Image: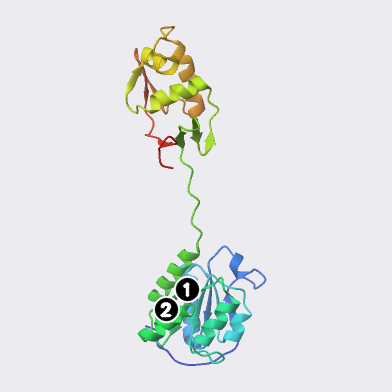
């Protein structure tokens, strides 16, 4: 556990950070600013967070020095600073760095004080004496909040029945009307073998009794459009009979299907 003692300094230590001209908020590594007037605690916390989180860490002994720094991802703020005591320091830091998440570290740990600190803009609270592992976990949780959510990958194939489109990775495939009908007849029956005559009648109409192998041409074109690299990936041939949809059951949009 960290023992809390009081020593005062005024300068900022940037030894664990990139040069100041590289803005904290635009660095690749997460950025943390430790604002703590106790020299031992400040150095210990900065060294630990730098090593444990691969973070760029700045360390300041006063609020005045901290306010001259670029805004970090997370600020670890002691409320017992020599130049701005208590919630005044939190308010000033919030005004100067609205984008930073603030973890308040303080010996003032009553429930009422913690609640008031959260109401005044703290994002989390840790009470002295604290363990470095607890502090690390709390800073890491705040950094996860800062991280942008990854954009969802577009689904491989989506069947938009209302628009009569098949989308691959979000882009509509250039299917002819007959290719679309072949697709819809097969995809609506995943895992079910459909004979050539049945497939022709589903696609062209119940009174069609023409050349059965005509459907093979359209299936061949459809296979290559669904996946040029693996044309047999979605539609399997049932030898001597017809075809079967072997791809995944598709998300269907339009005509009452949920988007």
**Most extreme residue toward the front, as rendered?**
256
Q: Is 22 on the left or on the right of 107, as rendered?
A: right
Residue 250 screen position, x and y as percent: 40, 35
- The quadrant holding residue 20 is bottom right
Residue at image x 53%, y 67%? 30
Whether residue 128 is visible: no
Q: Does residue 54 show up?
A: yes
The disc placed on residue 125 is: 2
Q: Quadrant of residue 29?
A: bottom right
- Height in image: 184 above or below 201? below
Q: Specify the quadrant of the image occupied by residue 184.
A: top left
- Front residue of 98/202: it is 202
Spot occupied by residue 259 in the image (x, y as percentages of width and height): 44, 42
User: How is colour applied across the structure in the image?
Assistant: rainbow
**Residue 122 image offset from top left, x and y in percent:** 47, 77
Near mark 2 (Cα within 10 A), the count class, few <14, some 14-19 or many ≥20, is: many
Counting the numbered discs, the total is 2
Mark earlier in primary sequence (2, 1): 1
The residues tagged by marks 2 and 1 sit, at their Cα atoms, a distance apart of: 17 Å
Which tag is nearer the camera, tag 2 or tag 1?
2
In this figure, which residue is indicated by the disc labeled 1? Answer: 49
């Amino acid at each position: 556990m960290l023992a809390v003692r009081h020593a005062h300094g005024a300068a900022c230590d940037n030894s664990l950070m990139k040069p100041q001209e590289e803005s904290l908020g635009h660095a690749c590594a997460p950025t943390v600013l430790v604002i703590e007037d106790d020299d031992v605690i400040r150095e210990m916390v900065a060294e630990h967070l730098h090593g444990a989180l691969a973070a760029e860490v700045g360390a300041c002994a006063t609020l005045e020095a901290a306010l001259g720094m670029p805004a970090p991802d997370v600020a670890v703020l002691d409320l017992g600073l020599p130049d701005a005591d208590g919630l005044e320091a939190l308010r000033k830091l919030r005004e100067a760095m609205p984008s930073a998440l603030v973890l308040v570290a303080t010996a003032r740990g009553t429930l009422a004080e913690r609640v008031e600190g959260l109401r005044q803009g703290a994002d989390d609270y840790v009470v002295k004496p604290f363990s470095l592992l607890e502090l690390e976990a709390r800073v890491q949780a705040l950094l996860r909040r800062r991280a942008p959510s990854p954009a969802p990958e577009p689904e491989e194939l989506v069947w938009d029945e209302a628009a009569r489109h098949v989308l691959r990775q979000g882009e509509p495939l250039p299917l002819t009307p007959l290719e679309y009908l072949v697709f819809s007849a097969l995809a609506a029956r995943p895992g079910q073998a459909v004979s050539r005559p049945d497939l022709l009648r589903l696609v062209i109409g119940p009174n069609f009794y023409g050349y059965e192998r005509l459907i093979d041409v359209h299936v061949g074109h459809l296979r290559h459009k669904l996946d040029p690299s693996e044309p047999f990936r979605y539609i399997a041939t049932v030898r001597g009979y017809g075809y079967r949809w072997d791809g995944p059951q598709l998300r269907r949009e339009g005509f009452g299907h949920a988007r």
